[in-house]
Amino acid sequence: MSTSPLRGRDLVSAADLSAAEIGLLFTRSAALKAEFRARRRHAEAPLQGLTLAMLFQKPSLRTRVTFEAGMTQLGGHAIYLTEGTVLGGRESVGDVARNLENMVDAIMARTGPHEVVVELAARASIPVINGLTIREHPCQALADLFTLYERFGDLRGVTLAFVGDGNNVYHSLALMGATLGMHVRLAHPAGYGPAERIVERARTLAVAAGGSLSFTQEPREAVEGAQAVYTDAWTSMGQEAEAEERRDAFARFQVNAALIAAAPEAVVMHCLPAHREEEITSEVMDGPQSVIFDQSENRLHAQKALLAELLAG
Ligand code: CP
């Protein structure tokens, strides 16, 4: 059997994966999901004897549990490390990387600054996975687009409308969606758009794959005709001081029944955690168009596929 093209690689940005590699991960995610759903066990343990160090500078439910459970379910082990033990100024990022590469087989890191994950990846000889930074959340995008792949198959030409902040989740969706030839729209309030360098990179990827990026300040314009409507919290981790100002700025950008009426065929998505009745109403979140809890389940399956390909593919 040939070696996986992902073996030994890092996942720092959603742009690190080609369309073929994303397709490989979707296929493996689907197989792992079907097997796990049928038996709650896997017949093989490809990660037996392997260890993942998980570094968290920020809180988490889904990322921690899906990576830790995913390692266990594939025969490996995960170690949870918090700010008090690493990346809190106790030693340099480079020294953390040089220690961990001699002890474990991969690192997953959730940090504030993106540069910390970039440096870990540059310094460590083992795979480094971005578990969320201020700039990107590639594992979320992988699980989200796998969720759409389950419904639509080939994602070329599929339209995803993101309503809200041009944040890290939008950045990774735009990059990965563009790679797959999707049409990625963003409706955002003035002053809350995405980073220009991410937009430039995503535009280049979209042009090459036959997709597009577009921007508006009118949520209804973005969602009309879309196959997926996506939202995220208006205030991300670390922006708590801006919460009130953001509530005012984003008030027109709530995903509610009136907005969804303009996209009656669309699935509704959210990366969670949600602030019910702020960026999304409970009526929509728990309604028939919602695939939100499929997305969170798919974090498990997509990341297991990623770990298996990076470490044992
Ligand atoms: N969506 C997401 O990354 O969830 P957590 O912050 O709970 O990990």
Image (cartoon, rainbow, N blue to C red):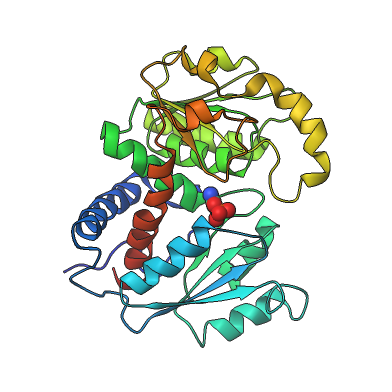
Q: Is residue 124 left or right of residue 179?
A: right
Location of residue 14 in the rendering, given as x and y in whole percent from the top left corner: 49, 48
Quadrant where the C terminus is found in the figure = bottom left
Is residue 227 visible in this depiction of the protein? yes
Location of residue 115 in the rendering, given as x and y in whole percent from the top left corner: 68, 60
Residue in front for this viewpoint, 254 or 129: 254
Location of residue 109 in the rendering, given as x and y in whole percent from the top left corner: 58, 65
Is residue 191 visible in this depiction of the protein? no
* Whether residue 14 is situated above or below residue 270 in the rendered picture: below
Residue in front for this viewpoint, 65 or 169: 65
Location of residue 234 in the rendering, given as x and y in whole percent from the top left corner: 68, 35
What count of labels does the image hold? 0
Q: Is residue 197 left or right of residue 290?
A: right
Q: Say which residue appears at 32% left-offset and 70% top-offset.
A: 73
* Whether residue 296 is situated above or below residue 87 in the rendered picture: above
Residue in front for this viewpoint, 283 or 69: 283
Q: Say which residue appears at 39% left-offset and 16% top-offset.
A: 264
* Whether residue 6 is situated above or below residue 253 in the rendered picture: below
Quadrant in which residue 131 is drawn: bottom right
Q: Is residue 5 left or right of residue 179?
A: left
Q: Is residue 58 left or right of residue 76?
A: right
Quadrant where the N terminus is found in the figure = bottom left
Quadrant in which residue 96 is drawn: bottom right
Quadrant in which residue 86 is drawn: bottom right
